[in-house]
Image: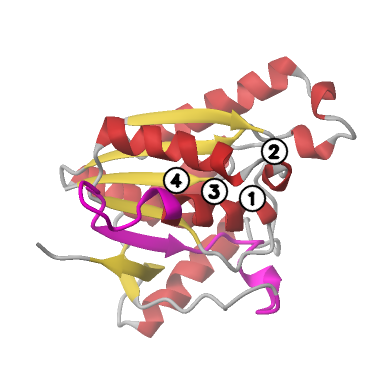
Amino acid sequence: MSVLVVAAHPDDEVLGCGGTIARLSGEGTEVDIAILGEGLSARLDRREMVDAAALAGLHADARRAGEMLNARSVRVIGLPDNRFDELALLDVIKPVERLIAELAPDTIYTHHPGDLNIDHGITFRAVLTATRPVSGCVVRHIYAFEVASSTEWAFQQVAPAFHPNVFVDVRKTIEKKIKAMAVYESEARSFPHPRSADALRAQARRWGSVCDLEYAEAFQLIRSTRV
């Protein structure tokens, strides 16, 4: 089994499936992380105004978080932050296709299409297009994750709501997720923000209560093919 996590922004990979990444890697699964967007630049009026050192620091944070979760690799593609809708969809699909060709994952975890953040929805669409179930496609399983402060903030008005039907026990790895998120000092927030450590633990406890677990991460199965 090999897994590719395709996230739109630095920290989405931790928020969406950090506990699952740590669990899978701890069990011997090769997990690679791809972050399509550069981060930070959407906070400025113009993309070129972003501080290069700050951006490099954020990408270093992403690599450090990946190491803490024992991911095999972390790659930042560098698409414009929160501006994926200004690109041709093909320009988002192509990097995903190249990653799949190189890494040959049988499983992908990515965003839910109904998130408030525009980049999340486009990332999902790019993944789904890049993994069309045609001859030669190696990806057999696709799961969508939720991202705190985006999935729930769509209030079910943007697209179909997140309806998880797969749950992963992260009792042993929830604190690794919390510590990896703490690496992102520019992205973490204090309670009651959804990205705070307390809120993330509460989210995992809530999903755990749905399926008789202490802590769980929740996913929506998009497609699964057994051969």
Pinpoint residue 39: horizontal percent, then vertical percent. 66, 35
Which circle, 4 or 3, is nearer the viewer? 4
Q: Label 3 sits on what residue type?
A: Asp
Element type at mark 2: loop
Give the CA distance from mark 1 to mark 3. Answer: 11 Å
Give the CA distance from mark 4 to mark 3. Answer: 9 Å
The numbered mark at residue 12 is: 3
Magenta segment range?
A: 129-157
Q: Do the residues labelled 1 and 3 touch (CB within 8 Å)?
A: no
Identify the mark nearer the N-term, 1 or 3: 3
Pinpoint residue 167: horizontal percent, then vertical percent. 33, 71
Identify the mark nearer the N-term, 2 or 4: 4
Element type at mark 1: helix
Observer-nearest of 164 and 222: 222
Q: Is the residue marked by circle 1 packed among few (<14), some (14-19), or many (20+) residues within 10 Å?
A: many
Is any atom of residue 215 visible in this view?
no
Element type at mark 3: helix
Residue at image position (54%, 23%) is 60
Is any atom of residue 114 visible in this view?
yes
Pinpoint residue 158: horizontal percent, then vertical percent. 69, 72
Q: Label 2 sits on what residue type?
A: Asp
Name the residue tied to disc 2. Answer: 81
Q: Are marks 2 and 4 in contact (CB under 8 Å)?
A: no
Identify the mark nearer the N-term, 1 or 2: 2
Name the residue tied to disc 1. Answer: 119
**Residue 74: within the magenta?**
no
Residue at image position (59%, 58%) is 121
Residue at image position (65%, 46%) is 188
